[in-house]
């Protein structure tokens, strides 16, 4: 039996089961993301869960305990699955629930599936162990692994009819993704170092005498670690300010979703700014009640209106 959304046939039982699986993956593994998408109507919430579940699969391959050759092979298989979805060759009887859900979502919304190819390209950079000399280099990586997710999500959200400068919405969605990813990089400095990874630009590390890396709960000797963190926080804030120009272009609930997700990361950034060395002692996070508070503010329109006013003032 199919459910309906706005009076139209929505999905069959196998498709709804596939979406339920994706929602379970999202709820278990992406708590920040999940707080935002709870604010969406059913069809958009399901589609966003499908986007997340497919993205999670790609990320898990890159982060897993596999050899580089096996990772490359599995990423190639995932790209092949994406090609099948793009070609309409996945139906509701497929045994892969993520593929079923994503195929249905892509049929319902104008999702730019090429964004997943970019995500796979970004994860391949991780598999190769690439490092980044400059911010422009890191920006390329961030656009693959996060900016692309912003553009994929915009395919679900859409823009309001008559929205001013709507042609720039993909650009703003991309930039907001960069802001979230840079916040993630700051939060995960110690964890990434333990895994042999370094993301912050080498130029920035050298500027603040942090080129030795981050392998303990205290900053490198004679470094200006706080200066490094504050420098990157300012960069992230500028990206947030630019990306927030997307919000007035979205409908109320889509805007609330984006405001909630971004608001959680902005508060996380505030915590990192107040106590930079905390990221060397463990993962900085927000308590669930604070995330819920941010989500409620987004749904009520408080954060959306506040951010929109700030954006207008910057333009003036």
Image: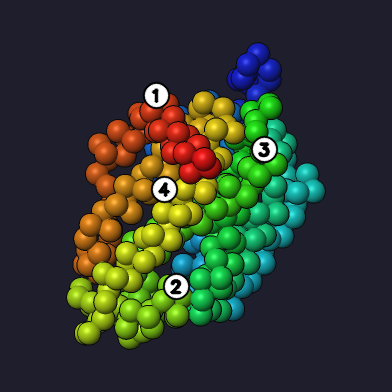
Residue 247 visible? yes
Question: In the picture shown, does residue 112 fall above or below 249?
Answer: below
* Measured Cα–Cα span from mark 3 to mark 1: 23 Å
- The residue that disc 1 covers is 300
Position of residue 303 measured from the top left corner of the image (x, y, whole percent): 39, 33
Reading the chain from its start, which is encountered first: label 3 or label 4?
Answer: 4
Mark 3 Cα-neighbour bin, 10 Å: few <14, some 14–19, many ≥20? some
Q: What element carries label 2?
A: loop
Residue 98 visible? no
Position of residue 110 measured from the top left corner of the image (x, y, whole percent): 71, 39
For the point 65% across and 13% down, which residue is it?
7
Reading the chain from its start, which is encountered first: label 2 or label 3?
Answer: 3
Reading the chain from its start, which is encountered first: label 4 or label 1?
Answer: 4
Confirm or deny contact between disc 3 and disc 4 (CB under 8 A). Answer: no
* Measured Cα–Cα span from mark 1 to mark 2: 36 Å
In the shown orientation, is residue 286 left or right of residue 298?
left
- The residue that disc 3 covers is 166
Quarter-wise, where is residue 93 in the image?
top right
Of residues 60 and 227, the one nearer the viewer is 227
């Amino acid at each position: 039996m199919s459910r309906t959304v706005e009076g139209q046939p929505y999905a069959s039982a196998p498709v709804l089961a596939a979406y339920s699986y994706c929602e379970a993956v999202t709820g278990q593994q992406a708590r920040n993301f999940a707080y935002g998408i709870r604010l969406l109507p059913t069809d958009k919430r399901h589609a966003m869960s499908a986007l997340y579940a497919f993205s999670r699969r790609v990320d898990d391959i890159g982060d897993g305990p596999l050899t580089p050759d096996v990772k490359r092979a599995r990423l190639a298989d995932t790209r092949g699955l994406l090609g099948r979805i793009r070609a309409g060759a996945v139906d509701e009887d497929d045994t892969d629930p993520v593929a079923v859900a994503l195929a249905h979502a892509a049929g319902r919304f104008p999702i730019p599936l090429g964004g997943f190819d970019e995500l796979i390209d970004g994860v391949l950079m991780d598999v190769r162990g690439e490092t980044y000399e400059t911010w422009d280099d890191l920006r390329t990586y961030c656009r693959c692994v996060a900016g692309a997710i912003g553009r994929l999500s915009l395919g679900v959200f859409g823009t309001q009819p008559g929205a001013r400068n709507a042609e720039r919405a993909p650009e703003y969605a991309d930039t907001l993704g960069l802001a979230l990813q840079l916040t993630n990089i700051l939060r995960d400095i110690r964890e990434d170092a333990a895994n042999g990874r370094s993301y912050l630009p080498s130029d920035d590390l050298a500027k603040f005498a942090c080129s030795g890396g981050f392998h303990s709960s205290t900053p490198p000797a004679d470094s200006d670690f706080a200066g490094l963190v504050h420098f990157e926080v300012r960069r992230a804030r500028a990206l947030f300010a630019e990306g927030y120009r997307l919000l007035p272009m979205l409908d109320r609930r889509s805007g609330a979703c984006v405001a909630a997700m971004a608001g959680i990361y902005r508060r996380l950034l505030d915590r990192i700014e107040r106590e930079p060395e905390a990221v060397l002692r463990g993962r900085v996070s927000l308590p669930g009640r604070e995330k819920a508070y941010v989500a409620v503010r987004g749904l009520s329109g408080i954060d959306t209106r506040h951010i929109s006013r700030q954006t207008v003032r910057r333009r003036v």
